[in-house]
Amino acid sequence: MFIELRLLLALAAMFLLPGGALLAMSSLWPRWQGFPRIGIIIGLSGAFYPVLFYTLRFWLPTVRLNAPIMAALLVLCALVMMVRLRGRQRQLLALDGLEWCAVTLLGITLFSRLWFAHLHPYPAWTDSLHHALLTRMTAEQGQLAHSLEPYFPITMDMYHLGLYAHAATLQWLAGVSSHMALVWSAQALNGLCGLGVYLALDVLIFQNAPGQATWVRHIGALVGAATAGLFLHQPALYANWGRYTQGASQSLLLIAWVVTLHTVADWGGGIVNTSPTHSSDRTGKRIDERIDVPGTSRRSNIAWGALFSGLLTAGVFLIHFRVAAFYAPLLAIGILAVLWRRRGRALAAAIAGAIAVGAMSLFFILPVLWTALNRYITLHRTPQTMLTPAQVAEIVRTYYSFTWDGFPYLIGISWWMAALVALLALVGLWRRNPLTIQSVLWMAALYGMGMLYLLNIPMLRITNLGAVLILFYLPIGLCAGAGITEIVQMVSDHWQPDWQRRASLGMAALVLILALPAARLRINTVEPFRFFVQPGDLAAMRWINEHTPPDATFAINTYFWLANAPHGTDGGYWIPYFTGRHTTTSAMPLNAADFDYQEQIFNESHAVEALKTDPSALDTLYDMGIEYIYLGVLGGNFDPPGLDLAQLRQSPRVEVLYAQDGVAILRILPP
């Protein structure tokens, strides 16, 4: 329990102090009030680590971070907040009743993710292996890794490494293992998935309809955040897939969007108060005044806004490149909507603001942008492959094509809830709600991106439809919240203030009541076959460390997800992480390795596949230099039959070295 306490305290410091210090140093502290201020602080903190680590690796490559440095940096952030906010510390907790409901909802969502991490401390599925290795390497090296060596000869030039800045920092501060730091940091970010939805529904709706009652927006924002965070089984299901980087980036996406649109609008001639929960608005009265914060200049505000927008946008990109591509159409739609409402000098100024944000974003992502683009273009322009045309066609069919019956699982929604959200979206469209319109356009653009493979242009195959559909919880949350906002606005127009207050509290209570069983469902959203590492495997890993040479290679149960993507199916896949030994499979970014290494892995994996039915494959494996076989607890749990211990025992070429708790380790003897 003490370990979990250290993790919680470290996470709280990580996600509150850097963003709090940045906002406190800026002239924008008075502009963001109430719960939106807390959301911006968390968002800035989330973007801080990837930008810091990438920037130092690029500009100061000899600098190495470590636990004392990061702890001192967080202490410095706390001191900055204390000095800058002297006498104003209580402003952080100056929330109205409905905003405290939002804090409670955020806490429930975070609890559901972190309790899952407590119950399942070992990461699931295939991507988690290289996630854990990169976390360890970042913590050991003090900077982001350039490759997966010494574990695998795979370059990381085209891979997003931002999440490992979070995980390595948590490993340093909490003093935990790499895999635990990975799971807890990723799950904390996953638990923030509804925060951006709330900010968009509360802040952007206010910008578009400043005369709308505050409590109406708060109710819609609560519903939207609960929908995205708890009522759908995405993105909670990401933890079963090891989809940590995509989920982490998407948790920052809408926060970046809100701040960027706020900044562009501010450049274009001023903006209404972004946080309508100040003291004059606590009773739900309508407001329409523009804010003019004493002691701040417009020039300072727009400069800080551009900096924060660039930082957040860069954070989205550096944690997951593909999510940045998903973000691009939403950003374009939102900026065009801001520009549409301006004319003359205001329009020119808003365009200048958009350019300033873009320039700031490019500056922050410069350390990786050119290298990643160059690698991507090279791989798609002159691809090397050992696959037959039939295998390539099968990969395209398997990876890019999805049938309608799989949509509910990928989106994370039941058919009845899909119908309800569609109805709410129709209400929003009928009422011309800007967020509904922009969300629907965004979903259409994303769907189009997922279908670009049909053009048969390799350079445009940036994603498949599955990666798009599992992001739909964000626009669905926006549509649900915006629809509820419009319905509540229509029915409450003629209510007395006392009835409005009672109704708002009742609706908020209902959302929180429904959130509790939903949180339990999210905790129990488990696909057991994806959790390769079992207690029996851990004991076997200790035996391997004590009884095998460091350069040993193990044949493991293997499954070809695609013709060019073999991976393990049990705890044997984690041998490189726990022991440093090699296996016949590699990490999932195998396509980033050189051609000879890919060919070696394919040949070894096919030999293991053959061993499932043909004992003579032992000769092939031995000739390849593979002396050991590992049969994990799960075995061929989703790809039966897997390697058969009873069959292998019968071969005179096999010696059983270890058989305990469902794990067997065999040696292949010379002929």
Image: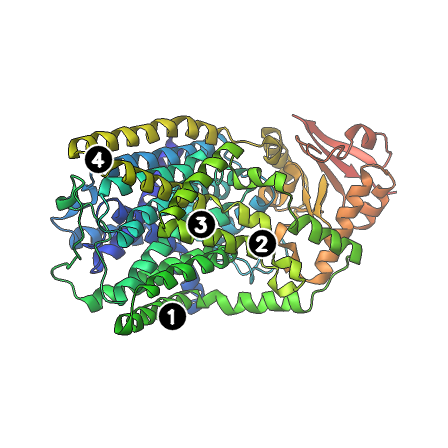
Residue 241 percent location from the top left of the image:
56, 41
Provide the residue designation for mark 4: 97
Q: Disc 3 to disc 4, how far (Cα)?
A: 28 Å
Considering the numbered disc 2 on the image, is that residue within a helix, a strand or a loop? helix
Q: Are marks 2 and 4 in contact (CB under 8 Å)?
A: no
2 or 4: tag closer to the N-terminus: 4
Q: Residues within 10 Å of mark 2 (few under 14, many from 20)?
A: many
Q: Disc 2 to disc 4, how far (Cα)?
A: 42 Å
- Mark 2 belongs to which amino acid? Gly
From the image, state whether disc 2 or disc 1 is nearer to you: 2
2 or 3: tag closer to the N-terminus: 3
Q: Disc 2 to disc 1, how far (Cα)?
A: 28 Å
Judge whether 28 appears above or below 167 on screen.
Answer: below
From the image, state whether disc 2 or disc 3 is nearer to you: 2
Give me the disc on residue 450. Answer: 2
Provide the residue designation for mark 1: 359
Give me the disc on residue 218. Answer: none
- Mark 4 belongs to which amino acid? Gly
Q: Disc 1 to disc 4, how far (Cα)?
A: 39 Å
Provide the residue designation for mark 3: 250
Quarter of the figure with the N terminus: top left
- Mark 1 belongs to which amino acid? Ala
2 or 1: tag closer to the N-terminus: 1
